[in-house]
Amino acid sequence: MSRIGVFVCHCGENIGRTVDAAEVARASGNLPGVAHATDYKYMCSDPGQALIKQAVAEKKLDGVVVAACSPHMHEKTFRRATAGAGVNPFLCEMANIREHCSWIHENRPAATAKAIDITRSIVEKLKRNAPLEPIRIPVERRALVIGGGIAGIQAALDIADGGREVVLVEKGPSIGGHMSQLSETFPTLDCSQCILTPRMVEVYQHPRIKLLAYSEVEAVEGYIGNFNVTIRRKARGLDETKCNGCGQCQASCPQKKIPSEFDAGLGKRTAIYVPFPQAVPNIPVIDSGHCARWKGIVKGLKKFACGKCIEACGRGAITFDLEDKIVTEKVGAVVVATGFQLYEIGRDHEADGLKGYGEYGYGRIPDVIDGLQFERLASASGPTAGKLQRPSDGKEPRTIVFLQCVGSRDPAKGIEYCSKICCMYVAKHTMLYRHKVHDGRAVVFYMDIRAGGKGYEEFVRRAIEEDGAEYVRGRVSRLERDGDVVRVQGFDTLSGEPVTIDADLVVLATAMRSQPGIEALAQKLSVSYDRHGFINEAHPKLRPVETNTAGIYVAGACQAPRDIPDSVAMASAAASKVLGLFSNAELEREPNVARVDEATCAGCFHCRRVCAYGAVERKEIRDKKGNLVKVVASVNRGVCQGCGTCQATCPGKSVELEGFTDPQIYAAINAFQG
Amino acid sequence: MSEATTSTETTAGTFEPRIQAFVCNWCTYTGADLAGTSRIPMAPNVRIIRLPCTGRIDTLFILKAFERGADGVIVSGCHPNDCHYAAGNFHARRRFAVFRELIDFLGLDPDRITFSWVSASEGKKWSEIVNDTTERIRRMGPFSAYRGLAGRTP
């Protein structure tokens, strides 16, 4: 590049006051390779930009340096002007002599000298710039939504209603998620299933939603706009196309004592089952762990113990085909909405370093249950048809004690975060209980009440003032079974007195945790997660539903503890991001991405190890006969975000980041330091 | 470069250090922009080179700056966990931990290099780093040892 134009801006008085812009132009004009240098009052104004275009045309300039404000301010403006003059926009660079010079220095000669330095360094860098073209990536305008809870349902419906196809993958037999298990929802006390099930049906009937229930994501390859997803469709043991959901198979199954997952272990189900009557799809699965016939087939037995469901099915749908099927889907965007699990304080705490709460006897004392189990007891569709009966003897509890923050906000036990929803659902539980048992006693042990949200504080006040819930500020140290009561020993920190209550039922508001296996899924998707297994958003404030991998979005409680309104809002936000991405058939990106010199690459793949985006791929170089010559690194331009870590890591100097190449940077250093 | 205007010796005879800064585009460069927008005065001795991420900063850049006449170097990027590119600054931190050992071994005083994190909202912190580094290097005096090693006129 030998005909560079330097345009020095006064920015009114902003630069002109402390930097002699004319002197900067004069000094820059003497630099080798600079064919034209001038100064002007406002370079960003229309006449200023016209000046650049005119000079490019008249002096046949092949590069432009604008010495003015920060590139964050006007780089786009001047690159557009340069392109308008017929020169590649990436042959325009800005020298920041305002924010980094005139505004922070008083001494005019020193500031002018620095401005000349800055401009010279940028001129030297520009000489090594290459013309670049924006990267265009075709976009497959279909989305994958992982998780069929309320967040996944909302995201899928919004994207599909926006006119794009959606593949919705749910690992369980039915969509609906935790919300389908809830009795009523805060702060309105509307019936959870009444508002959820119509949406589930809408998903099932939507012409643009392909529902793959009882399926899991096996592998994800590709990048924004172009993901190839491998999905395992787990064997239900029957032919979905023949099943009409009549339920005869369930009725005939002799195994009726299997704890129901949907009823949080309080109800029973059969070995061939639909998790709940409103399930979508309304197609049973056979539980391989419990079905005698299935186990027999796996063992290779010739004679099978049972075949009752086969006999009962009028449509011959039950095939006992035990093979999982693998399907692939091509999508352009992914929404992760895998939800949460509750901290099972008595059972699985050893597995991941959590210490558990042995002193509460959960899993040992039958009348100590968790919040989700209380939902099932209170739910009209639950194991007791909405009648409040405690698990041990079916008696209606006269006194219920609720413990908040079991697991949450307790660094000593492994979880320091607040689970956010418990204050609200405990208040709701006290109301549900008092609405069913008017003279019953509801006592809540709490640390603080966190009721931030529209109508939330009022809701908690209502529980206390209108429904008579007793709130005791303090912790419970021990739960013990004594005869047919659970003895609650706690401490009231407001009165400073120990408290002992004989409760008929104790409900633990256990912490919300990320789903088991989320780490493996996150690794398949190349998205990051925090140490609690919650998916990291790209920016906690400004990019709350994007992940650090382009084209992958996050919604609901897999990102952090979330209630239903938050989850739905996130899901709609993620859907709008997806629809925005899908608004064009091609995606245009800045071309500042890494490029590998295949001739010198030794294939050590240090670059691959440091890439946060999985943008570095292995590429085989073969000779004409097809013999493998070597394996080199290759950067996927669609995935690369242009940080340049690979380049600084490459021991063989075989990677260059476009726009920030080694020759460019060294030229800038040399120009500064003389 | 004949046009070099930053001289090691000023006319008054006091030593004015030349300091080369390598900063990331998203945090420190923007933080330095904010210092400008906030009109926070600072020493005019620092020359900034903008890179996308501290992860892009090759340690050879630092050696090159010393070789070409810098008396001090500043490297600054996003705070840990705030990297625009998720982890570039962690790679940079690891690289510079090793690099410090190396330059010590080379006989190059590690105090000539300032490593720092400056976020986009820390204009004030940037000005302090610029002033502190300038003062420190001024006290340490001109640096010509590495220029000599690299075969250039000290």
Image: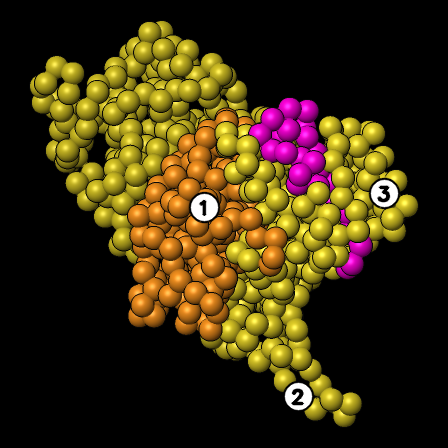
Q: Quadrant of the N terminus of chain A?
A: bottom right
In this rendering, would B74 be left or right of A641?
Answer: left
**Would you name the residue on which mark 2 appears?**
A629
Task: Tell me: residue A552, above or below residue A1.
Answer: above
The orange-coloured chain is labelled B
Could you tell me which residue is drawn at 29 percent across and 29 percent down? A404
**Identity of the amino acid at label 1?**
Thr
Disc nearest the viewer among 1 and 2: 1
**Same-chain status of marks 1 and 2:** no
Q: What number is the disc on residue B99?
A: none
Could you tell me which residue is drawn at 60 percent across and 41 percent down? A115
Please give the range of residues in magenta.
A1-25
| Mark 2 vs 3, N-terminal side | 3
**Would you name the residue on which mark 1 appears?**
B10
State the residue in front, A340 or A262: A340
Could you tell me which residue is drawn at 71 percent across and 43 percent down? A26
Q: Residues within 10 Å of mark 1 (few under 14, many from 20)?
A: few
State the residue in front, A25 or A664: A25
Residue at mark 1: chain: B
The yellow-coloured chain is labelled A
Residue A12 falls within the magenta-colored stretch: yes
**Identity of the amino acid at label 2?**
Val
The percent coordinates of residue A87 (x first, y second) are 83, 50
Q: CA distance from mark 1 to mark 2?
A: 58 Å
Q: Kindly indicate whether the residue at mark 2 contacts the one at mark 1 (C-beta within 8 angstroms).
A: no
The percent coordinates of residue A33 (x first, y second) are 75, 57
In this rendering, would A462 be left or right of A215?
Answer: left
Residue at mark 2: chain: A
In this rendering, would A383 be left or right of A16?
Answer: left
Residue A491 falls within the magenta-colored stretch: no
**Same-chain status of marks 2 and 3:** yes
Q: What number is the disc on residue A55?
A: 3
